[in-house]
Structure formats: C-alpha cells, structure tokens
Image (cartoon, rainbow, N blue to C red):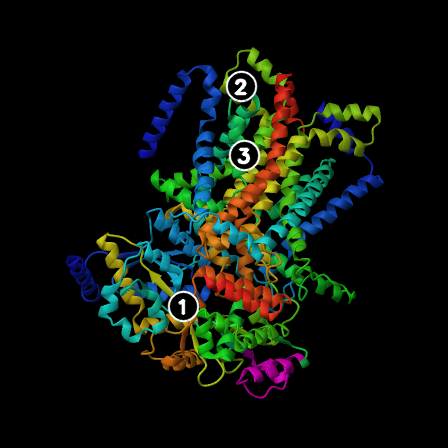
C-alpha cells in the first residue's frame, strides 16, 4: 500500500518534470546521480575525513586529534608493506588481465567452434565466491599437496613451485589467482567492443591485403579505446579494493608479506575496532588514487571539450 | 526504575513458573555458530529457551568479525537483535560506554553470578557494578594436541611434561621423518602458539605483567626474551606448507598420523571426533606443563542491545538466565567442544580433555584471561602483527621486544 | 550480407594459424578449468579421502551426498536446511537491482555523452573516485542515512544500496560505450526533433544491446554474489542466499566440510553461470552497427 502511494507520488513528480522546459531534461535525468554522488559518495568521504581526525574506536567520536592517525599510519610497518605490495600487484594484475583478456577476446572472435562454451569457461571463475575458489588456489599452490607435488610425482623430482609460502613471491600467487578470476570479464567487455566494430573495416582491410594481426593491432585496438578504458578502470578499482582473495588465500601471510591496504582498513574497521585509523587509511588510499588518476581524467576532459567545440 | 525492576522480576518468575499463557518472550539471537557441531550446540540453547517458554529467532552469521559488525550496524540503524554474541573480552566495552547495552543485573544478582563465574570473566562483563553480558562457555585456546600414532612411530614413550621435553619430542618426530609441529601459518594461530609459550614457559606472573600490566620492564626482561626465542624455535619444526594453512588442515595432519603435535584451542576436538578419533586413545591433550600451569580462559557471551520494550527486556533476561543454568551449560559445551562457565556441574558425560579442563578450573589460582580480556582489540591486533612478522622473518629478538613495548604503550 | 561473410570465413581450412588458435584456446581453457576440476572431485569425495590431501585424485568412493547436504541439510545456525533458503530472496533482490541500476547507468551515460550538462563532468569524476572506496568503509554512514529514510533493513533499502554501489561502473560502462557512437547520429536525431527521452528510448537503448549484456553480466554476478551489503541492509526477512552459503562454508573454529563447501559454492553460482551461457546469443556481431545504419 505504502509502496503504491510512493509510486503514485513518483509518477506525479515525473509528470511535473515533463512540464519543465525541454532544456532542463538532461539535468532532471542526472538528478538521481547528483543526489547519490553528493549524499552517498561525497558525504561518505567527508564523514571519513572527519572520523580520521578523531580518536574514534568502535563508534565515531566527535573530538579532533589532528593528523595523529595519519602519523600512526605511516609509522606502521604493515601499512607501508601493504602499499608496496599493492603497487607491485596492481601493475602485474592490470597488465596481465588486459593482455590475456584481449587475446581471449580476439581468439574467440575467429568464428571458432563452441564459442558459447569457451566464453562461459573463461567467465565462470567470475561467478564463484572466492571464499571457496580461493581455498582451491591455496591447495593448488601449496607445495605439500598442490601442483609442485603433482609434478614431482610425474617424475620431475626437483620441480619447485612454492611461491605461496615464499615471502618474496607470495604476491605473484595472488596475481595468478585473481587474473584467473577477472580476465574473463575483460574478455567479455572487449568482445562486446569487437562485435560493435563495423564489418566494413574488415572487408576493406582484406581487400587491401593487410595481415590480420596488423589490423588488430593498428586499426581494431585503437577503435576499442573506450572498451579498454572501461576494463582498465574496472581492474584499477579491483586492485584498490583487493581484499577477499588475500583473505581466502593467505590471510596476509606468510607473516605480513601479502598484506594489502584494503585488508588493513577492514581489520581496523571491524576486528580491531579502530575506525579512525581505518578511515585515515581509506582517505590516504583515495588520495593516492586521485593523484594517479586526476591528470589522466583532466587530459581526457580537455580532449573531449576540444572534440565538442570542433 | 523501581517499577521496572518489579516488572522484570515478575517476568522472570512467570517465565520459570507458569509460562503457559500466550506466546512467550521473543528473542532474536545473533551468533556465529554455523558449522555442524556449533549448530548442534546452539540448538541446545534454542530448545532450552523454548522449554522455558520463550520464542527463539535465529540469526546466524558465519565469521565472528562479520557477525559482530552486523550486530553493531543494526544497533546503529535502530533495528538491533535481542541478543548478540561477542567474545568474552573487551570487544563490547565501547558499546557499553556508549550506553547501547541493557544490563541483566536482575538475573545476575538473583542467580549469584559473582559466586560461580571465574574472576577473569566477571572483569569484562561487570562494568561499574552492572552485568552487561551472559557468558556461555569457556574455550582454552592453547591445548597441546598430539597424535598417538605419530608419537609411537617416533619412539616417544610418555607425554611431554615440560617445554624441554616438548622440544625433545619434536626433535624425535623430526628425526622419524614426520612433521613435528602441525601449524596453520595464519596470524591468529601464531598468536595462539605465542600465548602457549608465554603461559607455559613464562608462567602466570610474567604472563600478567606482559598482557595485563603491559609493563615495559617485563617486556624487555631476559625471561620474556627467552619466551620469544622459544616461540621462534617452534617455528623451525613446521613443514614448508604451513603458511596460510587453515587450523583444521593442520589437525588433519595429526589425524592421518603425518604430524605429531599441534597447539590449538579445544574446538580441535570437533575435528578429531568428525574423523571418529577419541581422546586418550587416538590422540592426547595436554592443557599445560606442570601442576601450576595457567588455564587460559577465552569464551563467548551474549550481550543485550538497548531497548525499552518490556517484552524484549523480558526476552533478554530470560535468555541470560536460561543459558547459564548448569545442566544446559554441560549440554552446550559437549557439543561445542568447550567447557562450562561454572564448575558446579556434572562432569560425568564430558570427554576426557574437558574433564581435565574442568578439574584445573576448580583451582582458582590457575585461571587466567586470554590476551583480549586485557588488551583492547587494537592493541591485540598490533601485537599479532608483530608476532606473525617475527615468526616468519628473521628479526632480532631485541627489536621484537622493543616493538611489542611500543605497540602496547598506548 | 552478414551471412555470406560468415559462411565464407567458416569454410577456412585447418591451416597452421587455425591450429594455433585452437591450441591457444584449449590450453587457456585447461588453465581456467583446473580449479573447477578440483572443486568437482572434492565435492564428490567423503571427508576421509579429502583429509589425505590428494587434491587431484579421483574419488575412491564416489558420493553425491555433499550436494544433497549443501542444498537441503547443511547447518547454517540452529536450522539445518542448506543453502536453498535464500534463493527466492536473492532473486527478489537481484532482478529489480539489476534492471534499475542498468537503466540509471544507461541514462547517466547517455546524458553525459551527448548532452554535456554543466557540472555533470565533475559529478561523474567524483562518482568514479567513489568506485575506489572500499565498500565496507561506506557502510556505517549509509546505515545511518538509510535509517533516517526508514529504509534500513528492507527490500527497497537493499535495492537502493545496490543502485548506489553499481552506479559508478554502470555509468562508466555506458558513457564509454556511447562515446564510440558517432556524434552525427545524435545530431541528426536532434534535427529530426527528437527530445531527450525519445532519442534515449528509441535510438540509443536499442543499439546498446552488447553493452547491456555486459552490464547485466556484471550486475547479476556482483549482486548475486554480494554478501556484506545484503547482510547489513536487507533485513532478516530478505537475507540473500550468499548468507546461507557463507554460513555453510565459513567458520573460524568450527569443523569444515570441504566437499559440502565446494558443492554449495558451485550450486550458488549456477544463476550467474546460466546468464553467461544464455547471453551468448546477444554477443553477435553487427547489432550496434546495424542499428547505426538503420
């Protein structure tokens, strides 16, 4: 009943909006986004900023302690190690996902038999909860009963693959497992892009006798720009939020060798009941991302303006 | 206030006595007991609550941190459960200080909790004279488990009775080609091993000086340095696949006779009995070395989010009373693998290890709280970070002492 | 036209390049399927066998019991009814959340790409930065906001939450997709007198099929697998299936039944998986191109 009333009210609002001048339509359409951005996102960030300068524990406190939490953050070995791990992980993960996802999309796009099955095979890891698949990866990578042991039983007694217990290599195992999980999605995004490219271009290229790989590299790839951009941003957000897979596979270990910032934040948010430090961590993370992304975004919006004014 | 008290008492009386009329008090209970044995245990509570005239509404959320954070979020969102599980530690101190919990003084005073609850539990549930949580069980996190088959294979005659004998046994296991120490290399498990060494080698006094008093002199002392070195020495007995391993996978190594010893809480019994192994026959359990070794108390409790609804308060008080009764305490713990919160119970149906635990508990001087009953969650976490780094890396012990002193300072 | 091209290409002989393509795809598929193989064999072994630690070995005594247990009798608290409990709740959350977030994302992307409203670029920038905040950090303030709106612990509440968290990526997806559509097309529609919503509904949406499929894949997967948001915001009566899944497979000090865990995980993922399989028919070349021409 109440839902119906709400719906009616919504409809009336829509009708009102229609009465408004046509020009204001884009603004009206963007209203939900504006509300969510201002209240949901900007509000949250400001709230976190305030909390990060307080002495909050389980609940937000209303005092002001300046940059104490930030000082503690940067005196913390685990946080620093987390940042370092994230940088290494981020580069490897994004590059690997883009390359593998692109290759998969291109190869699947060659009119191969069983495309539907293959596509699902490459995408299925994305559908599964990492709590269980992370455990499977932990087993696979475990030197005692995983791949190392299997290859040794095949007769290669000296084979070694114990990265997951090696403090210097453990991050690579996280890369392997998460690339396994995410590259299928990159494939899907790029495949959608590929399928959107006009058939005429292929015909023209064939007539001109350009080898297929060259067409992909110098004509198709540039045309896929927006799709690659989408995939890149998605992967980038996944990097910054990396948490589940680490918890499922290594819990940050051995020691603190595979700790990541999001896990640091989560641990302090919940288990360690220190939301002030957790907020300081997420603000720092956000700041880093902004510094990395802002010039790129600025350049793009300048380019868009130029294009529009042409 | 006086009136409220009377209503509460009336409610209690009616619940225990003539709870025939209408549907009784309804309690939504939030907890993280979701696996087989835990589920069977909490069912005992639910059944007892129903038998006492209440209605049990179950909200189970796996993972202790997850469950606690949802409880806190629901309190903040104005839609709290009737009761929520926390560990019997300082975890809920902040919520008490915010005035967001109801007390259960009516039950605690009437049933004389002060008389039968261990001091370390009272210290965290009784704040400024009010009782804010109903403890439900006691877990001892530092049992030393050993596989009888592995000991036999390595030619170890008797149970080790001191740290030195433990190391000797580990050496023999290693020589026999077995995994000496089955260890899951996760931070919290390393914390357990550390606690075991601190309690058994350092003794009660040093334990309290470090964890309760956070005394810098004790942390920098020679005795504590030896504790840290023994802890680090244990690391040399684990197998290469240890890092990241779940605790139950380590227990499986004992069950299959591949490994000799594991240091883990009494919940490990569940894993043994799942594989049809019996204490005293297939595996042994050592609570500690010597007649005075401390018995570390960890456990779960229900807290009661603030409400003014008299029906809900009735439900809270009834729950606090039901779960602390001696008979139900034994039934719950037998399924859970813990021991009761009180020693005035019939132990005949408990297993060998639990009986041993209860026997030790009768000596009050051996009761001692776990780290989290003294440290706040943040300090405890920082300590865990240092210990896991030390376990896995080559860090000079003096630096570890310095780091611990710094982490526990504030 | 398209058909002849397809036929012509399909008749290609098995030359070395062709063999290379299949070799790559098959070895990639093998890598992707390895964990699934482990999950499947683990799910049909009794625990005694799993404890031995031979993860690659086929079961000595095959059993389907873990699957039955996972679906209908695994314990998730006092109740032991498996993961089936939350199935309909999950559907009730996924369907409206997916549709709404895609619709709003498409609308945002369209308005951002073609209408260039003042300040919209900045809003979008902030929105995209929002995608980098760990979800958990936002929970506490959002709980308070939803409580103030009387939407906390309700179905509309959790749907709104999914719309909020889906918005950055959905908007980005459509904005970038529309960016690749020729501006002339839009200008022509404007000259023909098309209004904001008419152009959106009659021109843009119909040619968005491939990206809508990608968006649906992402949202269905993300929302179906969401655990933390459903747990906090949906309320006791609307808890999604993943809460039961987590109660089955996740434990700190309880006994872990790996065979049941694997079965439960695979069962839960069947809904997104079927979406992937079905989505194939829309991954066809020329939908967008055809729409542009038409």
- Say if labels 1 and 2 share a chain: no
Vertical position of residue B83 compared to residue B323: above or below: above
Q: Position of residue B95 (x, y in %)?
A: 35, 56
As measured in the structure, the alpha-carbon distance from the residue carrying label 1 to the one carrying label 2 is: 63 Å
Task: Please report the residue visible at 41 percent of the width from the left and 75 percent of the height from the top.
Answer: B368
Label 1: how many residues lie within 10 Å, few (<14), some (14-19) or many (20+)? Answer: many
Chain letter behind tag 3: C
Q: Which mark is residue B49?
A: none
- Say if labels 1 and 3 share a chain: no
* Among the two numbered marks 3 and 2 on one chain, the one whose residue lies closer to the N terminus: 3
Q: Is residue A118 magenta?
A: no
> Which residue is under mark 2?
C199
Q: Position of residue B256 (x, y in %)?
A: 60, 74
Chain letter behind tag 2: C
Q: Nearer the viewer, residue B141 or B136?
A: B141
Task: Please report the residue visible at 52 percent of the width from the left and 68 percent of the height from the top.
Answer: B191
> Which residue is under mark 1?
B299
- Say if labels 3 and 2 share a chain: yes
Magenta portion: prevailing SS class = helix
> Which residue is under mark 3?
C170
As measured in the structure, the alpha-carbon distance from the residue carrying label 1 to the one carrying label 3 is: 45 Å
Q: Quadrant of the N terminus of chain B?
A: bottom left
Which of labels 3 and 2 is toward the front? Answer: 3
The part of the chain drawn in magenta is B146-174
Q: Is residue C188 left or right of residue A22?
A: right
Disc 1 element: loop
Disc 3 element: helix
User: Residue most toward the bottom?
Assistant: B157
Q: Is residue A274 left or right of residue C177?
A: left
Q: Position of residue B120 (x, y in %)?
A: 37, 71
């Amino acid at each position: 009943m109440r839902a119906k009333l709400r719906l009616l009210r919504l409809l009336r609002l829509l009708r009102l909006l229609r009465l408004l001048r046509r020009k204001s339509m884009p603004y009206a359409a963007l209203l939900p986004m504006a509300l969510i951005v201002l209240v949901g996102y900007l509000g949250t960030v400001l709230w976190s900023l305030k909390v990060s300068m307080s002495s909050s524990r389980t609940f937000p406190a209303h005092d002001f302690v300046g940059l104490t939490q930030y000082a503690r953050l940067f005196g913390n070995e685990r946080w620093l190690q987390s940042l370092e791990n994230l940088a290494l992980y981020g580069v490897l993960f994004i590059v690997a996902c883009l390359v593998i996802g692109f290759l998969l999309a291109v190869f699947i796009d060659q009119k191969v038999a069983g495309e539907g099955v293959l596509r699902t095979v490459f995408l299925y890891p994305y559908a599964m909860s990492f709590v269980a698949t992370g455990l499977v990866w932990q087993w696979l990578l475990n030197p005692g009963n995983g791949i190392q042991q299997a290859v040794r039983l095949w007769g290669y007694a000296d084979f070694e693959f114990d990265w997951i217990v090696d403090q210097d290599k453990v991050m690579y195992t996280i890369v392997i497992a998460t690339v396994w999980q995410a590259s299928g999605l990159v494939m899907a995004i790029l495949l959608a892009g590929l399928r959107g490219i006009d058939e005429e271009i292929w015909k023209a290229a064939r007539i001109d006798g350009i080898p297929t790989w060259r067409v992909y590299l110098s004509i198709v790839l540039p045309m896929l720009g927006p799709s690659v951009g989408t995939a890149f941003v998605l992967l980038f957000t996944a990097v910054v939020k990396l948490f589940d897979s680490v918890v499922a596979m290594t819990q940050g270990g051995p020691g603190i060798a595979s700790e990541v910032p999001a896990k640091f934040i989560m641990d302090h948010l919940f288990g360690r009941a220190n939301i002030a430090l957790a907020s300081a961590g997420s603000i720092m993370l956000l700041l880093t991302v902004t510094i990395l992304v802002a010039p790129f975004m600025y350049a793009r919006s300048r380019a868009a303006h130029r294009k529009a004014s042409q | 206030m006086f009136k409220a008290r009377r209503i509460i008492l009336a409610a209690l009386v009616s619940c225990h006595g003539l709870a025939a009329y209408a549907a009784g008090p309804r309690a939504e209970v939030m907890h993280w007991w979701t696996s087989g044995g835990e589920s069977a245990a909490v069912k005992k509570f639910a059944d007892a609550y129903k038998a006492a005239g209440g209605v049990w509404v179950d909200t189970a959320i796996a993972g202790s941190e997850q469950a606690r954070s949802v409880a806190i979020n629901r309190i903040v969102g104005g839609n709290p459960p009737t009761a929520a599980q926390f560990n019997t530690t300082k975890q809920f101190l902040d919520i008490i200080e915010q005035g967001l919990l109801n007390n259960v003084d009516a039950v605690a005073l009437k049933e004389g909790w002060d008389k039968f609850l261990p001091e370390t539990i009272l210290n965290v549930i009784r704040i400024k004279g009010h009782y804010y949580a109903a403890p439900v069980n006691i877990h001892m996190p530092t049992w030393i488990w050993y596989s009888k088959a592995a000991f036999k294979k390595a030619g170890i005659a008797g149970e080790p009775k001191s740290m030195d004998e433990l190391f000797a046994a580990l050496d023999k296991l290693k020589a026999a080609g077995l995994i000496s120490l089955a260890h899951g290399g996760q931070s919290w498990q390393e914390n357990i091993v550390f606690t075991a060494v601190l309690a058994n080698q350092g003794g009660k006094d040093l334990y309290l000086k470090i964890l309760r008093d956070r005394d810098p002199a004790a942390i920098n002392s020679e005795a504590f340095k030896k504790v840290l070195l023994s802890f680090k020495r244990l690391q040399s007995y684990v197998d290469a696949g240890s890092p990241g391993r779940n605790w139950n996978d380590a227990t499986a190594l004992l069950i299959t006779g591949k490994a000799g010893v594991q240091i883990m809480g009494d919940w490990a019994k569940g894993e043994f009995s799942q594989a049809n192994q019996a204490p005293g026959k297939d595996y042994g359990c050592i609570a500690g070395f010597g007649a005075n070794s401390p018995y570390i108390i960890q456990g779960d409790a229900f807290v009661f989010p603030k409400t003014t609804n008299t029906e809900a308060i009735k439900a809270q008080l009834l729950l606090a009373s039901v779960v602390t009764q001696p008979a139900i305490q034994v039934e719950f713990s037998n399924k859970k693998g813990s021991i009761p919160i009180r020693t005035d119970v019939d132990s005949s149906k408990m297993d060998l290890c639990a009986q041993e635990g209860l026997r030790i508990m009768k000596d009050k001087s051996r009761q001692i709280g776990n780290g989290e009953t003294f440290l706040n969650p943040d300090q405890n976490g920082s300590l865990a970070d240092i210990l896991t780094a030390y376990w896995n890396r080559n860090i000079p012990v003096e630096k570890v002492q310095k780091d611990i002193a710094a982490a526990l300072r504030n | 036209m398209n058909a002849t091209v397809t036929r012509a290409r399909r008749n290609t002989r098995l030359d070395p390049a062709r063999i290379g393509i299949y070799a790559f795809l098959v070895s990639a598929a093998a890598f992707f399927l390895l964990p699934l193989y482990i999950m499947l064999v683990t799910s049909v072994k009794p625990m005694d066998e799993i404890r031995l630690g031979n993860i690659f070995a086929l079961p000595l005594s095959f059993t389907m019991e873990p699957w039955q247990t996972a679906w209908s009798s695994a314990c998730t608290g006092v109740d032991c009814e498996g993961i089936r409990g939350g199935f309909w709740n999950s559907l009730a959350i996924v369907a409206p959340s997916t549709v709404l977030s895609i619709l709003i994302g498409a609308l945002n992307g369209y308005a951002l790409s073609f209408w260039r409203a003042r300040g919209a670029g900045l809003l979008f920038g902030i929105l995209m930065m929002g995608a980098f905040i760990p979800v958990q950090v936002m929970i506490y303030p959002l709980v308070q906001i939803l409580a103030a709106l009387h939407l906390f612990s309700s179905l509309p509440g959790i749907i709104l939450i999914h719309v909020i968290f889906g918005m950055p990526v959905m908007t980005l997806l459509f904005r970038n997709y529309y960016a690749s559509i020729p501006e002339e097309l839009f200008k022509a529609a404007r000259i023909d007198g098309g209004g904001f919503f008419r152009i959106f509904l009659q021109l843009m949406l119909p040619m968005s099929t491939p990206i809508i499929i990608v968006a649906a894949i992402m949202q269905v997967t993300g929302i179906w697998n969401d655990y933390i948001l459903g747990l906090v915001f949906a309320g006791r009566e609307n808890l999604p299936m993943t809460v039961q899944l987590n109660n089955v497979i996740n434990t700190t000090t309880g006994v872990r039944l790996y065979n049941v865990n694997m079965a439960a995980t695979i069962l839960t993922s069947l809904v997104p998986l079927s979406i992937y399989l079905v989505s194939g028919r829309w991954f066809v070349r020329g939908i967008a191109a055809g729409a542009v021409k038409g």
